[in-house]
Image: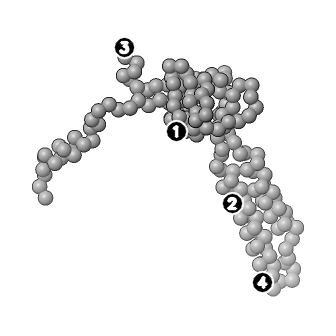
């Protein structure tokens, strides 16, 4: 197989975008004293709380208007400075809970099978086996209830901004 420069050139030309690239509008979470930021783009589903309102709302970001600092959801628009907090559901409590439940069931199952099959009358299912199983099952039930959400409040240490990252939009 020989090298064909024309095919190679056409392949490279296919990777060059022809036409304008669309700007990316993001909702940026900044932390005081940190250069790292978290960016939420259009299409992200958020659970948020407004200032003075105890209710949590949920919605998908439809559009961002950075010049007016407004977030558009499917049924409302909200100024960024009116958002008090975000809430994300944590995934690890459910998986750890499931593992603890199976650990407790396995502990009791092996203790019962061992007691029934070892042939030694001195060994039996003890209260310590039941305590390990009970503690494991209770922890597996309680863990997702205590650590269900991660809340991020905005105020002194965190700031929320709507940005347009299009370099052409900032030029006169």
Q: Which residue is at 72% across, 59% downward?
A: 100
- The CA distance from mark 3 to mark 4 is 84 Å
Callout 2 crowding tier (Cα within 10 Å): few <14, some 14–19, many ≥20 = some
* N-terminal-most mark, 2 or 3: 2
- The CA distance from mark 4 to mark 2 is 26 Å
Q: Residue furthest top?
A: 172
Residue 3, relative to residue 80: is it above or below? below
Disc ID at residue 82:
none
Callout 3 crowding tier (Cα within 10 Å): few <14, some 14–19, many ≥20 = few
* N-terminal-most mark, 3 or 4: 4
- The CA distance from mark 2 to mark 3 is 58 Å
Residue corresponding to mark 3: 172
Q: Residue 77 in the image: x percent, y percent?
A: 60, 28
* Left or right: residue 126 compared with residue 52: right
Disc ID at residue 43:
1
- The CA distance from mark 4 to mark 1 is 58 Å
- Between marks 2 and 3 in the image, the one whose residue lies nearer the viewer: 3
* N-terminal-most mark, 2 or 1: 1
* Left or right: residue 17 compared with residue 133: left
Residue corresponding to mark 2: 99
Callout 1 crowding tier (Cα within 10 Å): few <14, some 14–19, many ≥20 = few
């Amino acid at each position: 197989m020989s090298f064909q420069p024309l095919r190679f050139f056409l392949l490279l030309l296919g990777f060059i975008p022809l036409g304008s690239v669309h700007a990316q509008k993001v909702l940026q979470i900044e932390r005081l004293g940190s250069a790292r930021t978290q960016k939420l783009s259009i299409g992200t589903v958020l659970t948020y709380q407004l200032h003075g309102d105890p209710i949590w709302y949920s919605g998908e970001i439809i559009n961002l208007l950075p010049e007016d600092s407004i977030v558009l959801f499917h049924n409302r628009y909200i100024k960024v400075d009116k958002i008090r907090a975000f809430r994300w559901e944590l995934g690890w409590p459910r998986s750890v809970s499931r593992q603890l439940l199976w650990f407790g069931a396995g502990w009791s199952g092996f203790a019962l099978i061992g007691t029934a099959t070892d042939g030694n009358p001195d060994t039996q299912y003890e209260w310590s086996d039941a305590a390990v199983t009970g503690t494991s099952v209770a922890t597996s039930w309680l863990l997702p209830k205590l650590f269900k959400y991660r809340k991020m409040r905005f105020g002194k240490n965190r700031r929320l901004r709507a940005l347009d990252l299009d370099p052409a939009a900032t030029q006169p």
